[in-house]
Amino acid sequence: MKTYPDIEKRIGEIGRELYASRNKVPSIFNRKRWMGRTMDLAMRDEEFKLNLLRYIDVLPSLKTDSLVAELFREYFGQVENAPLIIRGGAVRISKGFLPLVAARVIRAGVRALARQFIAGEDHREASKALESLWGEGCAGSVDLLGEEVLSDREAAEYQGKYLGLLDFLGPHSRTWKEDLLLEQDHMGAIPRFDISLKVTSLYSQLDPIDWERSVAKAKENLMPIIKRAYEEGASVCFDMEQYYMKDLILEIFRQTLSDAGEYPFCGIALQAYLRETTRDLHDLIAWAKERNRRIRIRLVKGAYWDYEVVVNRQKGWPVPVFLNKAETDRHFEGLTRMLLENADTVRPAIASHNIRSISNAIAIAEELGLPKRSFEFQMLFGMGEALRKALRKMGYRVRVYAPAGELIPGMAYLVRRLLENTSNVSFLREFFAERKQFTEIIKPPEMISGALEENRPRGFTNEPALDFSMAGQREKMGQALEAAKKGLGGKYPLLIGGEEVYTGQEIVSVDPAQPRSVVGRVSSAGPGEADRAVAAALKASTAWKNTSPTARAGCLFNAAAELRKHREELAALEVYEAGKTWRDADSDITEAIDYLEYYGREMVRLGGTLHPGDYPGEINDYFYEPRGIGVVISPWNFPIAIPAGMVSAGIVTGNCVIFKPSGLSPVTGWRLVEAFRKAGLPPGVLQFLPGPGHEVGEYLVAHEKVDFIAFTGSKDVGLRIVTLASGTKPGQQNVKKVIAEMGGKNAIIVDETSEPGETVKAVLESALGYQGQKCSACSRVIVIEEVYEEFLTRLKAAMESIRIGPPDDPGTFMGPVIDEAALKKIRDFIRSGKDKAVLFLERKADGNGCFLGPVIFRDVDPSSVIAQEEIFGPVLSVIRAKDIDEAIGIANGTPYALTGGLFSRSPENIRKVREEFRVGNLYINRKITGALVGRQPFGGFGMSGVGSKAGGPDYLLQFMNPRSISENTMRRGFAPLR
Ligand code: NAD
């Protein structure tokens, strides 16, 4: 054990020794070579870098040479803009060479680039690479690259590949020559090779929300690999993935280890960019000590930094990573010390190419008196070759993380590596490309104030979803469900003029997952109550109209606070009354809060008086007044959000409103009304009037004192309302305004350049989320011929793997449809589909409730009933198209125009679809459901609706009459000059 009075000095000395490795520049930074020049350009020109990465990303999926050439043109335009790696191909294209020749050159260039980072395409090549590393004095860890796993079948394939790899590498590794540094640490023998694996690839439904099942299933699929690794003399490292999965992966790691008995060579990667890692490492060490076992920890900086920042910001969740690279580096040093201080419990692996981080680890180990063998360094294949040689020379074990796999799935990995190497904060870039001075490189990481923190959005922001990766949040939801279940079966009144009114008629609302369970009995209104409700609204209207817009907005903000306070409780109620899964139920509450917050702010914006024009002698006022009395008629599928939006827009603009909820979600409707009451809304401003749509609904629509109707629901009912509202009755003072949001027959176009995994996942979520009962749901997929079969096969496997069951089970992906009538209607459509199209998947679902498995029809005729009519259930029609123009034609070929989507990596196709696919909400390379208030204002046209978009800047205008007053201020030639 040494004590360094000045450890920095020692770090400097070690660093000097390693610094010499800079003289051997890796080829990707060597500007004398084409690869280095390409990287150099990428580092200097952001746009070029983006195009290069995108082109590399799409290239492996391109099935034909002409596509390779075509996409090349789309990304780089002229030859001069082409990256050097593919310049050869570009020149050939420009000279009119056959695409075949050009494509071959381009592919060869990119393959050469990939080869820098990917050790081999199969077991044999990977084994060779490991053997040659061993010959150089380096150990290896093989990571089998793969696409995102979307089905049980793909998970089984992934498992099989690892078993195959172990079978192959085990015997081979035993033939490698003896190398004590690589085979022993200070406590004894260690395996000759290592494998790194991703837990998320072993169970397609892995999700922290479904904690126990995820742990059990992942463990079940992991155990055969661990067992085989034991037999073949390998160690196993669990890679760390996205932050959302972190706690679950740690739990799976601990439980697997407990089950693995004697096997002492399991390890896990921890990421220093996460703020929580100190705590996690501390817990892991304590856990291992308690059990008297050794674990391996690979300490990395973290590879998903951009992802974590973007995704968590989008969700409105705290960003879990440090925003400054220096903070990560400092954290890394603290974690290094913790690891080395516990080298008898953990086998530390310091994974970094940063000379400062490495020197720091060595200096600490020296201080602690640790033998050189007691820990190891890890580096990535293709990076830092000279550095690892220098370390070996100094007597340290280095392990190379060697990805292996086909180029297609490997591309994602390659792109990540390129991004890393060209990022402003990459050590390798600073070291090799920018040739930073030694003093700069070796100094302790400095804190720089985080410019990124200041970029937070201001004003309206969306309410973040609940984070079910947190144990506390899962518990809270579980308790809310218990409580909601106990509270089922209550009686609920109407609300008229602030009075609760019980009538002789009742709507019995039941749980669609268990139709015998009554959620609540809600009084039902008839024409008499409707007249009273209109009268009460009229009575309250003058005072409410004269209430200031700011005070009216205040009521909305209070109601939002009420919903926030009870959000789990309300979500739990929706699970039982509407059959929503945890996440779907939660997002209905957040959307409701968003409407209240957004429209409140919008009213403050619109509430003042404008003075258009600037001329002497006249004053012009422009302002808005409420329309009067409104009726809000809502559907059951977003039982709080949709009425919250329509009701709040109606009242914040100064109108008094009669709200008729759907007969299938009246209890939830009542809870919304309660929130408004608690928010301080004066009596009479909002009435609650459940009742049969064709009776009380129509009565209200036609009522002579009603000035506007805000409706959301089906096309047939919407059109009926438009017709009824156009009639006038004696004594009627206003032409009624109708805002009607109706159904859709939404399509997603999948072209030949789309990313297969992302596309299947998004189509599945768009089609089956809430059992296909979202107005925005995908019910047609139009797929370009080249990728048609491949897409269908993966989609089917993915749909076969999702869980169908009661929605209060957190692992359920699909719950029941809303009621028996819906079930029957959907089954009728399926029957008609069977006559006209090819049934490709029909999953059965168990249970006494209204359950129905997903259905896929393939080769569907675009003009057939199932491709034209809204089904409102988990039934998907897949249609074949020969090219993008035909696909757009089919997509536009229904009277609806609500939502639509495109999956493509072709800039040209994206441009075309933006221009020609005419729907209210178009989504590109993402799912087509889940529009957010203020960010994706929602609503369609055609037969999908009349009105401005909900959650957008024009919405409130529909609830008001604009007025203009012009006063001549001139008297006998005298006018005030402003
Ligand atoms: P629905 O049309 O059957 O019922 C909607 C509401 O209208 C209910 O409150 C119902 O009681 C009432 N109603 C029924 N008949 C009526 C009549 N004759 N006069 C007055 N009111 C009447 O729709 P639903 O089944 O509740 O909801 C599903 C439909 O809603 C789907 O078509 C879906 O696409 C559509 N939807 C559209 C949007 C959108 O924003 N475009 C959002 C959600 C749902």
Image (cartoon, rainbow, N blue to C red):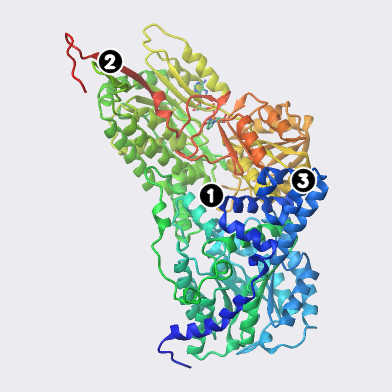
Quadrant of the image occupied by residue 869: top right
- Give me the C-alpha separation between circle 1 and circle 2: 60 Å
Mark 1: secondary structure: loop
The residue at which mark 3 appears reads as 93
The nearer-to-camera label among 3 and 2 is 3
**Exactly how many numbered labels are in the figure?**
3
Report the residue marked by disc 1: 808
What quarter of the picture does the C terminus occupy? top left
| Nearer-the-camera pick, 35 or 396 | 35
Vertical comparison of 608 with 236: above or below: above
Residue 965 occupies which quadrant of the picture? top left
Where's residue 646, x and y in %? Answer: 42, 30
Is residue 379 rendered to the left or right of residue 135? Answer: left
For discs 1 and 2, the disc positioned in front in the rendered view: 2
Q: Amino acid at mark 3?
A: Ile
In the image, 456 versus 620, the foreground residue is 620
Residue 627 in view in this figure: no
